[in-house]
Image: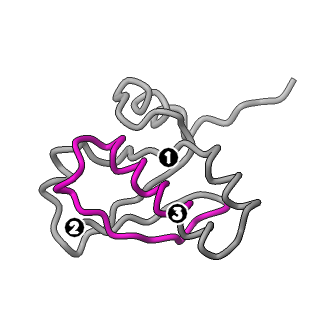
C-alpha cells in the first residue's frame, strides 16, 4: 500500500491508499486515485466537482514505477495534474525543465 495525495488547485489534500499489488504502471496509480476521488465526490453528492475531476489528467513525476514499488510505508506519493501523461518520461522531463521558466505575454 502507498499513501497518495493529490496536489492541484481544486482537489489538493485529497488522500487515498493504493494497493500496489493491482497496479502495473504510474498511469494505473493515477487512474485509481482519480476513480477514488470521483467516487468520493459522487457519494457526497457533488456533481459539479465530479465533472471537474473527470476532466483532470493526473500524473506522477518524482519517481519511476520501480521506485514506487520499493517505497517505504511512511512515504507519500504526490499525484499532480499539470500534464496529460503519466508514463511519458520525455514529456515529464520536458515539463520539469520548463517548470521554472516564466513565459512573457505579448
Location of mark 3 (residue) = 37
Q: Nearer the viewer, mark 3 or mark 1?
A: 3
Q: Residue at x 77, y 30 (%)?
A: 104
> Could you say which is closer to the camera, residue 76 or residue 57?
57
User: Which label was assigned to residue 1?
Assistant: 2
Where's the N terminus, which quadrant?
A: bottom left
Question: CA separation, marks 2 and 3?
Answer: 17 Å
Task: Place residue 89 in its image quadrant.
Answer: top left
Where's the C terminus, which quadrant?
A: top right
Question: CA separation, marks 2 and 1?
Answer: 19 Å
Cβ atoms under marks 2 and 3 closer than 8 Å: no
Taking the image as shown, residue 31 lies to the left or right of residue 47, namely: left
User: Which label was assigned to residue 58?
Assistant: 1
The magenta stretch is 10-38
Is 73 within the magenta? no
Please report whichever mark, 3 or 1, sits nearer to the chain's N-terminal start. Answer: 3
Amino acid at each position: 500500500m502507498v499513501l497518495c495525495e493529490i496536489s492541484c488547485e481544486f482537489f489538493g489534500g485529497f488522500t487515498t491508499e493504493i494497493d500496489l499489488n493491482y497496479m502495473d504502471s504510474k498511469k494505473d496509480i493515477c487512474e485509481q486515485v482519480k476513480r477514488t476521488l470521483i467516487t468520493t465526490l459522487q457519494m457526497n453528492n457533488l456533481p459539479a466537482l465530479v465533472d471537474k475531476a473527470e476532466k483532470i489528467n493526473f500524473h506522477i513525476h518524482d519517481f519511476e514505477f520501480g521506485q514506487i514499488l520499493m517505497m517505504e510505508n511512511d512515504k507519500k506519493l504526490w499525484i499532480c495534474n499539470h500534464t496529460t501523461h503519466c508514463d511519458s518520461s520525455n514529456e515529464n522531463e520536458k515539463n520539469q525543465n520548463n517548470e521554472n521558466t516564466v513565459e512573457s505575454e505579448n
